[in-house]
Image (cartoon, rainbow, N blue to C red):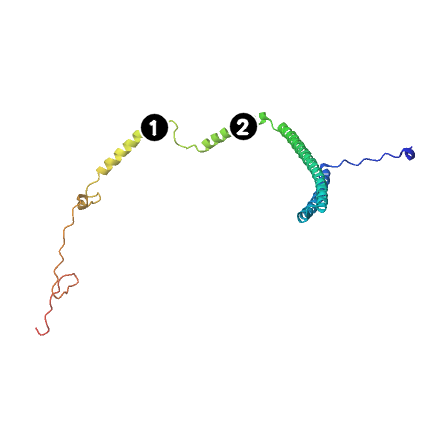
């Protein structure tokens, strides 16, 4: 049977959007080159028509130019069709890329959701509340220990503050009485002039004899008798 009808050929994978776009772009480039050549020929015919006198020759040149214009329009229509196909393929490629991105985002979110569920199984709100209560109890015990270690000894706890203030006032009265009982000659001397802010008495420099000599005590020296006397 295979010899008569032939074996079924395996179909290859369908072309991708990128392959189809590249193929259409190559066709568009070929059409653009043809249109460019036609423009160059039309420019030459236009120059010949300008230089040729009216007559059969000019009419023949015009007929060729008109034929080239028809070809150019045909190629331009083909190029527009190729541009439209490329635009459609670009739109499809954009939509496909968007779907791929959405699919990847969805897969990532599913994986994250699964991981969160696994973590939530290991963490319970009741355990957190119990831990907070235990921490509060431990802090209270720690404060009690600190207060116990910082307790002062030999000081009664039931001391009245008013009684302490009375003892302090009595101590200040005793100190004032002791300071008043000290005799005046034992009390430190005070500068009355300084307390009264009186100016100091003016001093006159001692007269110094003409000789200007003084003894060891600062008194005028006694003149010595001469050897002759």
Picture quadrant where residue 164 is located: top left
Q: Give the mark nearest the N terminus, 1 or 2.
A: 2
Residue at screen point 28% across, 31% down? 169
The reply to whether residue 174 is visible in this rendering is yes
- Identify the secondary structure beneath mark 1: helix
- Identify the secondary structure beneath mark 2: helix
What is the crowding at mark 2: few (fewer than 14 residues within 10 Å), some, or many (at least 20)? Answer: few
Q: Is residue 117 left or right of residue 218?
A: right
Q: Position of residue 199 (x, y in %)?
A: 16, 48
Q: Position of residue 214 (x, y in %)?
A: 15, 64
Between label 1 and label 2, give the one nearer the viewer. 2
What's the mark number on residue 189? none
Q: Is residue 15 left or right of residue 105?
A: right
Picture quadrant where residue 177 is located: top left
What's the mark number on residue 132? 2
Residues at marks 1 and 2, CA–CA distance in whole angstroms = 40 Å
What's the mark number on residue 161? 1
Picture quadrant where residue 16 is located: top right
Which residue sits furthest bottom?
Answer: 228
**Which part of the image, by quadrant, shows the C terminus?**
bottom left
Considering depth in this image, is 151 or 129 the residue closer to the camera? 129
What is the crowding at mark 1: few (fewer than 14 residues within 10 Å), some, or many (at least 20)? Answer: few
Q: Position of residue 207 (x, y in %)?
A: 12, 60
Q: Position of residue 82 (x, y in %)?
A: 70, 37
Considering depth in this image, is 129 or 155 the residue closer to the camera? 129
Which residue sits furthest left?
Answer: 229
């Amino acid at each position: 049977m295979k010899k008569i009808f032939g074996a079924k050929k395996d179909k290859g994978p369908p072309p991708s959007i990128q392959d189809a776009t590249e193929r259409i772009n190559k066709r568009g480039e070929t059409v653009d080159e043809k249109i460019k050549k036609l423009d160059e020929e039309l420019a030459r015919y236009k120059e010949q028509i300008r230089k040729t006198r009216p007559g059969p020759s000019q009419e023949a040149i015009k007929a060729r130019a008109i034929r080239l214009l028809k070809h150019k329009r045909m190629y331009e229509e083909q190029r527009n069709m190729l541009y439209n196909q490329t635009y459609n393929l670009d739109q499809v490629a954009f939509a496909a890329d968007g779907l791929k991105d959405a699919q990847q985002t969805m897969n990532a979110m599913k994986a994250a959701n699964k991981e969160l569920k696994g973590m939530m199984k290991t963490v319970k709100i009741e355990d957190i509340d119990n831990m907070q209560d235990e921490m509060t109890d431990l802090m209270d015990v720690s404060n009690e220990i600190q207060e116990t270690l910082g307790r002062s000894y030999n000081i009664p706890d039931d001391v009245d503050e008013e009684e302490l203030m009375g003892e302090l006032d009595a101590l200040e009265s005793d100190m004032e009485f002791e300071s008043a009982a000290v005799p005046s000659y034992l009390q430190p001397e005070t500068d009355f002039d300084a307390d009264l802010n009186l100016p100091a008495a003016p001093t006159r420099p001692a007269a110094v004899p003409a000789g200007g000599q003084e003894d060891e005590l600062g008194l005028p020296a006694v003149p010595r008798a001469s050897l002759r006397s």
